[in-house]
Image: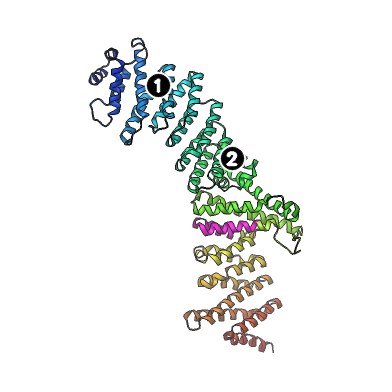
């Protein structure tokens, strides 16, 4: 029969093909179709695609003898559904063939009558209910049938099919495919809401590796509506359902999916921020904050995200300070300052341990923003002469803004430790704050000092940034310049090149017109002198000793000129060199000679 069908299908006029098919019984046609579908490994001349195409061509929708043509078309669909509903172990060949067959049938489905379409849809639902593996292309057929029935307003049929589908227990590996099918279906508003709620419940049943693609389908469905419900469901899943599981890698992938969805759907981003703003407790969850920081990479959401996090954190610090002053309230109120700190530090740690690279830049920007905001606010309070004292000790303690700026420094320090990619940015920010004399200069100097102490090996590649700061040393206020010299002192020990650059800058300051510049130069020279004397006394028989002694003599020669400057400068030189002569006796003679020359000149 198959050979005859193929020959007749090649004729231009298909009437002979139709007549031939009408002469065959439905059972014979059905048996032939089944045999071809089940022998997809064979290399017959007439393959299943050619056979099915021939039957379709010989079964015109109009005419064809008392509905025989439509019934033959339905038989093809019915047998293909049964075939796709029985998945086998070796599926590579079947999957390829299934794709071709489904592509052939999809345009023909809309030509069937509603009764046939209803029967086919119910067949597929029964297969899904059987809770067994199937070919996923079967769901494409189901989606097509559903949308055709929806177009012709078969409401009653659709409602029955929909109810049966949601009552079915899906096969575990079928969840993502079903979610994709539901996403492609034309649903009423009520049905859409039920689907979203059902899929959110299904999240807990999905295998962990299937969670990201399943959530991606949820995000796609949110374009049709119920964005808040979708976002709430996703956030609650990671914050509650998987709380005791290690889902860090999955969370990272889901955050990327959310980020991509936010780029495509502006309303979804607004809904996420609104959700977090309306319920501050959601900002105390690691995954939620990480999602916000991921969203901050999107330019149109950046300001809104940072404003939300900044205002919440500052508010928590201020409220916490008020509670400390009213201990009877503190007993009944949870301190949110520590909670916010813990969450952001956990996010920082997870950016390294879980590979959440997408939040690194946003977290860096947030930490810098917190430092700048806290210091500018603190400067305003300082101008009002506000002093915060503890009730118990009556001594000064850090206020909320000071604690906040220190926390921002701690976040930047951890990011510097974990991520090489962000170190250049942090050094750029340190340089920028110092050179612009910003209100946060001291905090960034403190950060630089900690980096110098704890991660000295990382500094060498960023020496140019520090040299840029030295170029403006003489223009900085004395307290900032002093702090800067203290911070970079360890570097002058290890890098001769840097020390020489520093000496050159200090030499220029030594002859500046203002007193502060000269005092700064003297303190800087004395600091270098101290470390070089220590170096020389510890290495008495090495080349390093000769180098240190040469530096000591060079600086003593420069300090000799200070003995003719203002009284404050001379006093600093006399007292400091006197102490150094006692601490390092091997240089006492050089120091005595310096003083004696000045003494004999005066006489």
> What's the magenta region?
404-432
For disc 1, the neighbor class at 10 Å (few under 14, some 14 to 19, many from 20) is: some
| Residue corresponding to mark 2 | 272
Residue 303 at least partly seen: no
Find residue 395 and report its horizontal and vertical position in percent. 74, 64
Of residues 448 and 343, which is closer to you in this image?
A: 343
User: Which residue is at 35% across, 18% downward?
Assistant: 73
Q: Position of residue 590 (x, y in %)?
A: 59, 86
Q: Is residue 601 left or right of residue 72?
A: right
Q: Earlier in the sequence, mark 2 or mark 1?
A: 1
Q: Is residue 401 left or right of residue 106?
A: right
- Estimate the x, y position of residue 378 in percent, counting from the top left: 70, 57
**Does the magenta segment cover residue 428?**
yes
Residue 16: give its label. Answer: none
The answer to whether residue 67 is above or below residue 500 is above
Q: Is residue 155 above or below residue 200?
A: above
Task: Give the secondary structure at mark 1.
Answer: helix
Q: Nearer the viewer, residue 244 or 358?
A: 244
The residue that mark 1 highlights is 109
Residue 464 painted magenta:
no
């Amino acid at each position: 029969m198959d050979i005859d069908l193929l020959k007749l299908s090649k004729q231009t006029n298909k009437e002979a093909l139709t007549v031939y098919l009408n002469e065959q019984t439905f059972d014979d046609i059905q048996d032939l179709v089944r045999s071809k579908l089940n022998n997809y490994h064979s290399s017959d001349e007439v393959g299943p695609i050619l056979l099915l195409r021939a039957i379709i061509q010989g079964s015109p929708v109009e005419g064809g003898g008392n509905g025989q043509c439509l019934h033959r078309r339905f038989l093809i669909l019915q047998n293909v559904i049964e075939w796709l509903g029985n998945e086998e172990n070796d599926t590579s060949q079947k999957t390829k063939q299934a794709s071709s067959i489904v592509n052939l049938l999809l345009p023909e489905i809309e030509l069937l009558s509603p009764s046939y379409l209803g029967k086919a849809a119910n067949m597929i639902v029964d297969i899904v209910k059987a809770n067994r593996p199937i070919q996923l292309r079967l769901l494409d057929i189901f989606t097509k049938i559903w949308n055709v029935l929806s177009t012709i307003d078969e409401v009653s049929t659709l409602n029955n099919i929909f109810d049966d589908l949601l009552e079915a227990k899906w096969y575990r590996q079928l969840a993502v495919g079903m979610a994709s099918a539901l996403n492609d279906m034309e649903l009423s508003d009520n049905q859409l809401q039920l689907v979203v709620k059902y899929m959110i419940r299904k999240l807990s049943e999905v295998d962990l590796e299937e969670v990201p693609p399943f959530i991606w389908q949820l995000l796609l469905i949110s374009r049709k509506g119920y964005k808040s419900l979708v976002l709430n469901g996703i956030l609650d899943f990671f914050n509650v359902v998987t709380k005791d599981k290690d889902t860090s890698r999955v969370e990272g992938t889901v955050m990327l999916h959310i980020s991509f969805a936010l780029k495509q759907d502006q309303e979804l981003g607004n809904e996420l921020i609104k959700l977090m703003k309306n319920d501050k407790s959601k900002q105390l969850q690691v995954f939620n904050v990480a999602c916000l920081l991921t969203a901050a990479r999107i330019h149109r959401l950046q300001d809104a995200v940072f404003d939300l996090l900044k205002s919440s954190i500052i508010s928590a610090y201020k409220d916490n300070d008020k509670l400390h002053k009213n201990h009877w309230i503190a007993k009944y109120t949870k301190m949110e300052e520590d909670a916010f700190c813990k969450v952001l530090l956990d996010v920082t740690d997870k950016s390294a341990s879980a590979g959440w690279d997408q939040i690194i830049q946003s977290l860096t920007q947030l930490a810098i923003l917190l430092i700048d905001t806290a210091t500018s606010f603190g400067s305003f309070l300082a101008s009002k002469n506000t002093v915060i004292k503890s009730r118990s000790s009556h001594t000064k303690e850090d206020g909320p803004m000071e604690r906040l700026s220190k926390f921002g420094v701690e976040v930047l320090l951890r990011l510097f430790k974990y991520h090489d990619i962000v170190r250049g940015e942090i050094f750029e920010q340190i340089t920028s704050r110092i050179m612009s004399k910003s209100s946060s200069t001291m905090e960034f100097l403190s950060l630089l000092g900690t980096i110098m102490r704890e991660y000295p090996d990382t500094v060498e590649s960023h020496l140019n940034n520090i040299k840029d700061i030295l170029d403006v040393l003489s223009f900085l206020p004395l307290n900032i310049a002093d702090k800067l010299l203290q911070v970079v002192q360890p570097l002058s020990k290890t890098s001769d090149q840097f020390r020489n650059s520093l000496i050159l800058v200090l030499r220029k300051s030594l002859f500046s017109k203002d007193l502060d510049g000269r005092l700064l130069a003297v303190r800087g020279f004395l600091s270098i002198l101290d470390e070089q004397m220590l170096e020389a006394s510890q290495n008495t028989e090495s080349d390093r000793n000769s180098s240190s002694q040469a530096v000591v003599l060079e600086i003593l020669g420069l300090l000799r000129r200070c003995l003719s400057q203002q009284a404050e400068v001379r006093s600093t030189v006399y007292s400091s060199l006197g102490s150094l002569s006692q601490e390092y006796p091997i240089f006492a003679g050089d120091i005595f000679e310096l003083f004696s020359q000045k003494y004999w000149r005066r006489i």
